[in-house]
Amino acid sequence: MDTGASEPAREAAGGFLDNPVVGMSPWIVFSLLVGPGRFEIAVALALGVALVLVIGGRIVNRGSSWKLLELADVIFFAVLSVVGLMADDGTRRWLETYAGEVSNIALVVVAFGSMALRNPFTLQYAREQVDRAHWDSPEFLRANYVITGVWGLAFLVSALAGAYGDLVLRNPNNLWTGWIIQIAAIVAAVRFTVWYPKVVRARARGTERGPLSPAALLVPVAGVLVPAGIAVLIFDGDLWWLGVALIVVGSTLTRALHRRASDAPAGDVPA
């Protein structure tokens, strides 16, 4: 066996699995897929992803600790699967409509609950990627509180958007409340999770650079406007002018932010 080739692959896979964004992927899959007529497939895919992550994590990272988020993934979607199988038609219709909000609220509870217990859920992932000497440093702990809080806010935004679409607009498939707003919130949280630790490390080294500026953080978020505009053109022809505006604004803003990030002087990192 070529252990020299397999070891880097194992390390790469381990690094991938030791990422809180990956741990949240079952919830993201479910919240974006669930809707009228899609409950069974959404919960089946989410549970499948959750099981793959748990089993894969134990195989690839044999010394890896069990994660609060992993356990919540499996328990929540296993219970939801059983409820869906046993539910009558009325309950199943309710689940198809509101299960997305329920899952988002559950994640809000996980995020802010773990912070209240002084163990933000991202901390379990982060400790497997840094030296033990940094585990109790104020900067390291504060970064995980901030990142966990951002994810809690992102899923709160998704829950509120979905609830508005379901309860006020009476349209679970509304393009904005069911897709665009929720995807934008998730993209922002994913980007922040990648960006913020680099900022913390750069501050510690005193080597802040332009790519770590707030403009660099906002580039992917601005980039969501372009596909959002395309989606509006395809699915909501009455608002074609809004789709065109989103594409133009998104393209212009993305270029401007790229330029600002590349021109940002050293030290242009938020306090």
Image (spheres, helix red, strand yellow):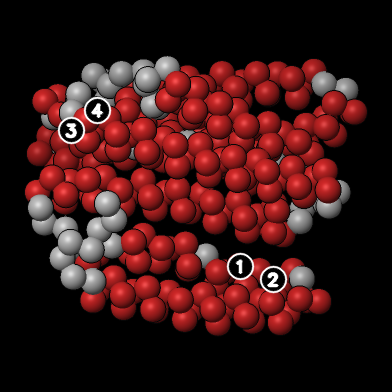
Q: Secondary structure at mark 3?
A: loop
Q: Which residue is mark 3?
A: 130
The picture places residue 261, in percent across and down from the top left corner, at 29, 70
Disc 4 from disc 2: Cα separation: 42 Å
| Residue 18 horizontal/vertical position (percent) | 31, 33
Residue 127 is tagged as 4
Is residue 48 visible in the rendered image? The answer is: no
Badge 1 marks a residue whose secondary structure is: helix
Residue carrying label 1 = 228
Residue type at tag 4: Arg
Q: Earlier in the sequence, mark 4 or mark 1?
A: 4
Q: Amino acid at mark 3?
A: Val
**Secondary element type, mark 4:** loop
Pointer 3 local density, CA inside 10 Å: few below 14, some 14–19, many at least 20 = few
Q: Is residue 212 above or below residue 104?
A: below
Depicted 192 relative to depicted 256: above or below? above
The answer to whether residue 19 is left or right of residue 238 is left
Image x and y of residue 254, in percent: 43, 74
Q: Give the residue at mark 2.
A: 232
